[in-house]
Image (tube, rainbow, N blue to C red):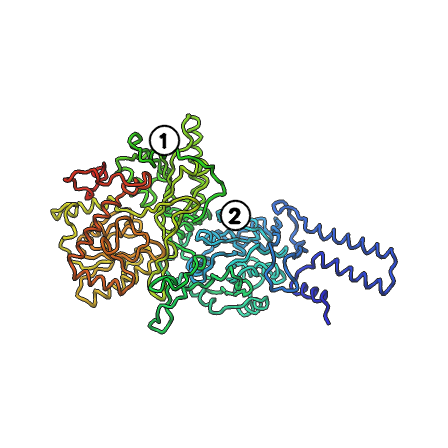
């Protein structure tokens, strides 16, 4: 019968794991006792054995007291496995989840192989480390990563062997709780991860095992397994034991320190021997996603080249670790709504969100934590810019545009309770007669110029059009009635933005102190970004007092997403606009002044003015949807546009199968040019169309198209809007559709009920012009309401049908 110690010794030999100190001392004690029985040991023998055991303990303990990785250099020949203790790992239950967190062992430094690395990174690293490049598109697949979040429900991820952190940074900037473990000291010193001090663990798996403190939804390891000899597998497999899903790529060719090059069959057999379950279906799906991305025409990485993702579509394998996947904290994996809707055409079950529809009160809704994280294209752009900025020798020169903040607080700093500054108190009390016009310092606009459409339309134009505000030209404007406005939508990841803005505030505060001016003043932080977010900058609050910082957000709906089974969007839920005692105000997009100028000119050619009943123009086009059907898709931003594509497809068929005149396609410019300029053919088309169908992005609400369609005088049909702009009401000033069938039904109804259509179009145009001009929005941000609202205009005034804000002031 094999004894416990013999089983332990055999297991350690199989895994290459050195015995623990306690195991060694127990083993020697057992041997000593056996000798005493066989030989009748003397007291001197006992003393000898005790001394021997004590020396051994001291010797083993000393091997763990290693010099700093930044100063310790030794010949490569001395590289041996560590005798690190495996406390927290149960050798009697090797498949169990390791307890706690293992201590990390940083890499030891050498100077003997740098000249052999050629183009690979790893300066000062041992030969089994490094091997990374500045940026390797063959291991990058944002399309796959998005599906991991949306389809598999990944909320947290352990990135094993992350190199410089390209993948870690992507997951971080898309809201995932991510941690990287990397052995190369050179890679960590050159990391692109925004906060490597807290998001990266330096550990060399040749020195011993390591695992994180908590379990993760997934572990991701690309270009890692082939670098680690099999005798060290135990050391990193213990980290995988704290992940529910394991995504690994393997090499099928040689390379820098590729010491484990095998076919898929070997790796599958090996990992299943370690207790993980290979999932062929998930593997096929992941490889398919990576291949799809490779084939896209608009697939461009930070280096200006397509994501090849070869390591993923060629060799990635997905394993399930049932012991972690079974834990309740990972029950959100593989999300899918569970309430029955109906059977599809092929007999498949179609679902709806529980707690919605006619049976809403009879169904328990799914908790928010069980839904996938919300993603948006601004997160993608933020990551691209970040990698371009921080990874050397990458393609430079792309103009920075909108970014998306993280939806969490930026600092543990707590500001002291304060009263609003005198100026802000007057604003709140509407006692503003003697403080107008307010000077407005806008950042980053003042430092970097116009970088987003909102800088141009809402901040620069809105402030300039308002009679009650003045756009400051100096960051250090010390006018007694000055307020600051910070727009988080460009230039930095959210936390970096907060830090940069705080630097300017500190500088102004110090100069105010020197001049004897108040050190607290009103600061408005605005979020016009796409993704749902309620950002907060506690660093700014700490400088000027929480009571003097106000927040607004454009995007206030989360969990809006595309449902492939239904071929429609799920509308999501509205955010709670109170967070941490702060009330956030909703600030949707606006009617652009340049759009109204072009409208005025187009109407003048028709002998009409903005104040005339524009909705009653002769309109020969029955229905228009300004999104390509098949052609010109490369000219628009197609991320999150499945609803738009579905509607264009639907209306294209509708036009072919009926006698209605339907336009589907582009007019004018799309993307950045369309957001910053106006094309006359687009304005002409708006004036020639009876019904304009608009559709929002799959993952967020609000867009400029809604307001543009309204001011053109057509009846506007929009998909469901949870955060409907003020003054707009379904069935009164705009009409909502919630399915393909309802859209076609509504179109046919309103094309045959002319007066009803014209009445809704007129009220929609009035609401857009009366409440949603650029100066309305900026005044609402600062004063809490619009001051330029026509209330004080005479009966002969054309207000609100005016081009400029001065025409609607009090």
**Where is 451 relative to 514, above or below?**
below
Residue 504: numbered disc: none
Residue 477: numbered disc: 1
Q: Position of residue 589 (x, y in %)?
A: 30, 47
Mark 1 Cα shell of 10 Å, populated few (<14), some (14-19), many (≥20): some
Give the secondary structure at mark 1.
loop
Residue 196: numbered disc: 2
Give the secondary structure at mark 2.
helix
- The reply to whether discs 2 and 1 touch (Cβ–Cβ < 8 Å) is no
In the displayed structure image, the side of residue 728 where residue 112 appears, left or right = right
**Where is 539 relative to 93, above or below?**
above
Q: Quadrant of residue 234?
A: bottom right
Q: Residue at x 24, y 43 (%)?
A: 593
Q: Residue at x 77, y 52 (%)?
A: 55
Q: Position of residue 577 (x, y in %)?
A: 38, 48
Q: Position of residue 125 (x, y in %)?
A: 59, 51
Q: Quadrant of the C terminus?
A: top left
In the displayed structure image, the side of residue 590 where residue 407 appears, left or right = right
Q: CA distance from mark 2 to mark 1?
A: 37 Å
Q: For this rendering, which residue is in front, 228 or 170? A: 170
């Amino acid at each position: 019968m094999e004894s416990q110690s013999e089983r332990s010794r055999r297991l350690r030999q199989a895994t290459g794991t050195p015995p623990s100190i306690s195991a060694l001392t127990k083993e020697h004690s057992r041997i000593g006792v056996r000798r005493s029985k066989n030989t009748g040991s003397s007291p001197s023998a006992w003393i000898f054995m005790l001394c021997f055991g004590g020396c051994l303990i001291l010797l083993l303990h000393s091997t763990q007291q290693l010099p700093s990785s930044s100063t310790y250099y030794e010949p490569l020949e001395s590289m041996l496995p560590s005798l690190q203790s495996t406390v927290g790992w149960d050798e009697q239950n090797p498949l169990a989840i390791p307890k706690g967190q293992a201590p990390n062992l940083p890499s030891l430094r050498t100077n003997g192989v740098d000249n052999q690395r050629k183009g690979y990174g790893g300066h000062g690293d041992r030969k089994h480390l490094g091997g990374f490049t500045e940026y390797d598109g063959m291991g990058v697949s944002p399309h796959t990563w998005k599906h991991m979040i949306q389809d598999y429900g990944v909320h947290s991820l352990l990135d094993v062997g992350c190199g410089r952190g390209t993948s870690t940074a992507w997951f971080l900037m898309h809201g995932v709780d991510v941690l990287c473990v990397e052995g190369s000291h050179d890679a960590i010193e050159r990391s692109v991860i925004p906060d490597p001090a807290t998001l990266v663990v330096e550990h060399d798996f040749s020195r011993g095992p390591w695992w994180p403190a908590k379990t993760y939804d997934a572990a991701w390891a690309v270009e890692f397994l082939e670098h680690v000899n099999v005798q060290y597998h135990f050391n990193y497999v213990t980290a995988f034991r704290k992940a529910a899903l394991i995504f690994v790529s393997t090499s099928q060719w040689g390379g820098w320190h590729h010491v484990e090059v095998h076919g898929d069959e070997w790796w599958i057999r090996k990992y299943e021997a370690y207790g993980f379950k290979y999932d062929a279906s998930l593997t096929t799906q992941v490889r398919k996603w990576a291949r799809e991305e490779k084939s896209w025409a608009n697939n461009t990485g930070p280096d200006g080249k397509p994501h090849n993702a070869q390591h993923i579509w060629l060799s990635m394998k997905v394993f399930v670790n049932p012991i972690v996947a079974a834990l309740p904290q990972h029950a959100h994996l593989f999300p899918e709504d569970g309430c029955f809707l109906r059977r599809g055409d092929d007999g498949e079950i179609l679902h709806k969100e529980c707690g919605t529809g006619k049976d809403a009160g009879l169904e328990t809704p799914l908790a928010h934590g069980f839904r996938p994280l919300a993603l948006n294209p601004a997160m993608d752009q933020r990551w691209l810019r970040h990698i371009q900025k921080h990874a050397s020798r990458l393609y430079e020169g792309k103009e920075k545009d909108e970014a998306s903040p993280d939806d969490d607080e930026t600092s543990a700093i707590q500001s002291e309770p304060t009263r609003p500054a005198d100026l802000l108190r007057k604003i709140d009390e509407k006692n503003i007669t003697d403080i107008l016009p307010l000077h407005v310092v806008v950042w980053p606009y003042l430092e970097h110029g116009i970088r987003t459409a909102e800088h141009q339309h809402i901040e620069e134009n809105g402030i300039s059009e308002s009679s009650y505000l003045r756009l400051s030209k100096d960051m250090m404007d010390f006018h007694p009635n000055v307020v600051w406005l910070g727009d988080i939508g460009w230039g930095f990841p959210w936390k970096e933005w907060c830090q940069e803005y705080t630097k300017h505030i500190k500088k102004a505060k110090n100069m105010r102190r020197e001049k004897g001016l108040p050190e607290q003043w009103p600061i408005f932080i605005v979020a016009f970004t796409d993704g749902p977010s309620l950002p907060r900058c506690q660093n700014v609050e700490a400088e000027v007092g929480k009571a003097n910082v106000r927040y607004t957000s454009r995007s206030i709906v989360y969990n809006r997403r595309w449902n492939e089974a239904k071929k429609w969007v799920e509308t999501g839920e509205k955010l709670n606009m109170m967070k941490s005692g702060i009330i956030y105000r909703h600030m949707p997009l606006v009617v652009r002044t340049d759009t109204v100028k072009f409208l005025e000119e187009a109407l003048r050619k028709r002998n009409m003015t903005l104040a005339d009943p524009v909705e009653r123009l002769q309109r020969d086009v029955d229905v228009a949807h300004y999104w390509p059907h098949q052609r010109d898709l490369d000219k628009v931003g197609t991320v999150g546009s499945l609803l738009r594509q579905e509607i264009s497809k639907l209306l294209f068929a509708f036009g072919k199968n009926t006698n209605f005149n339907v336009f589907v396609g582009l007019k004018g410019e799309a993307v950045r040019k369309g957001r910053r300029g106006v094309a006359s053919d687009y304005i002409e088309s708006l004036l020639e169309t009876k019904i304009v169908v608009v559709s929002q992005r799959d993952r967020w609400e609000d867009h400029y198209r809604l307001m543009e369609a309204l001011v053109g005088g057509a009846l506007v049909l929009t998909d469901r809007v949870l955060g409907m702009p003020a003054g707009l009401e379904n069935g009164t000033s705009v009409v909502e559709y919630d399915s393909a069938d309802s859209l076609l039904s509504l179109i046919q109804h309103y094309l045959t009920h002319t007066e009803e259509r014209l009445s809704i179009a007129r009220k929609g145009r009035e609401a857009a012009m009366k409440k949603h001009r650029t100066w309305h929005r900026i005044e609402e941000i600062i004063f809490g309401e619009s001051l330029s609202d026509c209330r004080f205009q005479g009966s002969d005034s054309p207000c609100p049908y005016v081009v400029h804000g001065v025409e609607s002031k009090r």
